Image (cartoon, rainbow, N blue to C red):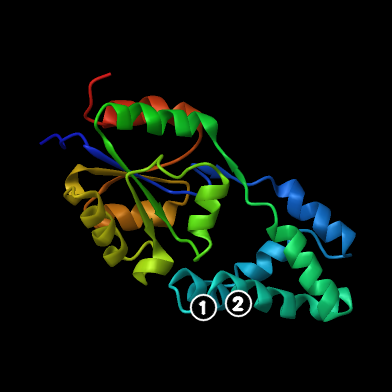
Amino acid sequence: MARERATALLLDFDGVLRRWDPAVAAVVEREYGLSEGVLGEIAMQWGRLQPVLTGQVNHAEWMSSVADALTESVGSPERARAAVEQWQSYRGEVDQEVLAFVREVRAAGVRVGLGTNATDLLDADLTALGLVGELDVVVNSSVIGVHKPAPEYFQAACVALATPPARVLFVDDEDWAVRGARAAGLSAHRWGGHADLRYLRAALDYQR
């Protein structure tokens, strides 16, 4: 039996709607004599990352722990804090083609949610990037206290969208998140770039 087309869209933020230029971190790492990729590696260590994604610590505390981990490498706490602040001052860029797609489907009556593992800085980022009002709902892991790919995360997202899981299409660039969404009963697609928009249009139930 064919699956019904989705009537709501749940989009990941980083890697789908927001892009990061890796050159920004690389510049900071070179300036402070750090090995390439070390800022992201330290920040993404699961024991450091998981508490901020579930709201147990805030973004500032998370970054403070990254600076602490860098202190020996850069020579002083002050230099470590400066390196992290410089790195964090860049908040990424909106993928304008994805945003145009969001506007298109919303205009046709499709509810669109942002489904992201994020910190308490998310609202400020959405404001800085001009995305306030561009989405129907925002489902932030640090607000609800559970992160993708847990089924409880996707359940909360579907409630926020006021749409049953079977009618929600989830899009993420990470395979583990896509698998989690499917296990929770959602349709899910792994984002590979703008060429995927044609498939997403076909998978959604709206009048073009």
| Residue 93 percent coordinates (x, y) | 61, 42
| Residue 129 percent coordinates (x, y) | 56, 44
Name the quadrant containing residue 68: bottom right
Q: Mark 1 points at which residue?
A: 57
- Residue sitting at x 47%, y 49%: 13
- Residue sitting at x 61%, y 72%: 60
| Helix, strand or loop under label 2 | helix
Q: Do the residues labelled 2 and 1 touch (CB within 8 Å)?
A: yes
Front-most of residues 13 and 1: 13
Considering every residue shown, the one lying at the far top of the view is: 208
Q: Residues within 10 Å of mark 1 (few under 14, many from 20)?
A: some
As displayed, is residue 126 above or below residue 121? above
> From the viewer's perspective, is 204 left or right of 171?
left
Report the number of discs: 2
> From the viewer's perspective, is 19 left or right of 191?
right
Front-most of residues 128 and 114: 128
- Residue sitting at x 23%, y 26%: 206
The amino acid on which the numbered mark 2 sits, given as a three-letter code, is Glu
Q: Can residue 125 be seen in this view?
A: yes
Q: Name the residue under label 2.
A: 61
Q: Is residue 14 visible?
A: no
Front-most of residues 186 and 115: 115
Quadrant location, the C terminus: top left
| Residue 187 percent coordinates (x, y) | 26, 44
As displayed, is residue 21 above or below residue 28? above
